[in-house]
Image (cartoon, helix red, strand yellow):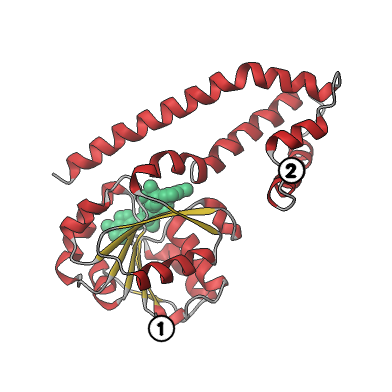
Amino acid sequence: MNHPVLGFIGYGSMGSMLINGFLARDMVEESNILISTRSPEKAASLKEKHPGVIILESNRSVAEKVDILFLCIKPVDFSEVLTAITDVIRPNQHVISIAGMVPINTLEGRLKAKISKVIPTVVSEVLEGVSLLCHGTRVTDENKAYLKQLLMSIGTVCETNEAMLPLYTELTSCGPGFFASFIEEFILSAMRHDPSLTYEAVSGLVVQTLYGTGRLMADRHFTPQSVVKRVATKGGITEEGVKVFEEKLPHVLDELFDKTLQKRSLMAEKVDQMFK
Ligand SMILES: NC(=O)c1ccc[n+]([C@@H]2O[C@H](COP(=O)([O-])OP(=O)(O)OC[C@H]3O[C@@H](n4cnc5c(N)ncnc54)[C@H](OP(=O)(O)O)[C@@H]3O)[C@@H](O)[C@H]2O)c1
């Protein structure tokens, strides 16, 4: 696809990450990006850095002018946005929703366009991480290839089907939150064991160690088990800590998945009701 015009409705955490990432990777000309968002002042720094980017006042104006439209809004805002844009959306446009909860067939029922779903991850802020991708029935191979190419510029891509999204989303999109929460507890526990330590000192050590551990697995293809084996020598100190994890973490993590997946289904039911 030659230089398509990209539209974004919503310039929040994810919308801004996608736009800044695509621009950083020279995937699109500034003047081929059109944005509308509820609080346009929040896009002021983008406009300073990339003056060619076009910010329009209405979602409808963006929707009617673009080839590819990213809906970077929360499920609760879909109803208002869809009502405003439905009659200007054309069959040859490609609409991409980043809201996991809104089913593709619901959007296909409301919009004449080709529909895909992308679940981005905050990790793509540093051009890493996995974007999840799935497509509706109308999307062509050319649309699929172009979207994948865009997303590959800010990380890697896992193409899957919609049924797999809930569990995969916990891994790739909620994962950074889970890992960060674990690291916070790791830091706080170290500080409880020596109150003279500062948060900055401990987090500096931990974050660098975590980064290196990630690289061992990603770059050197160590499995998690092989890292454990390398560090936790028999009868040694690390092994003592690993035993605590092996005893307690399976229950903690099973509970985490039980609770998050249950919450996800409850929220999906609420979103279904919103579209009835
Ligand atoms: N955060 C994540 O890690 C993550 C990961 C994967 C998927 N998602 C999904 O991505 C979507 C966006 O999440 P987010 O974290 O980016 O949320 P966010 O930071 O709240 O961004 C939503 C954006 O939409 C704007 N907006 C709301 N109503 C609008 C309307 N009627 N017209 C135009 N713009 C409107 C908001 O404006 P204001 O600035 O005025 O609020 C805000 O800029 C959600 O569906 C979420 O489930 C998020």
What residue appears at the point 27 percent right and 72 percent down from the top-left corner? 93
- In terms of image quadrants, where is residue 113? bottom left
Q: Is residue 122 above or below residue 35?
A: above
Q: Amino acid at mark 1?
A: Asn
Q: Is mark 1 within 8 Å of ligand 1?
A: no
Q: Name the quadrant of the N terminus.
A: bottom left
Q: Is residue 68 above or below residue 175?
A: below
Q: Residues within 10 Å of mark 2 (few under 14, many from 20)?
A: some
Residue 102 x %, y %: 28, 48
Along the horizontal axis of the image, is 276 left or right of 12?
left
What residue appears at the point 47 percent right and 79 percent down from the top-left corner? 30
- In terms of image quadrants, where is residue 137? bottom left
Name the foreground residue: 201 vs 162: 162
Q: Is mark 2 within 8 Å of ligand 1?
A: no
Along the horizontal axis of the image, is 211 left or right of 249?
right
What residue appears at the point 43 percent right and 60 percent down from the top-left corner? 15
Say whether marks 2 and 1 touch (CB < 8 Å).
no
- Asked whether the viewer can see residue 45, the reply is no
Residue at the spot of label 2: 213
Residue at the spot of label 1: 2
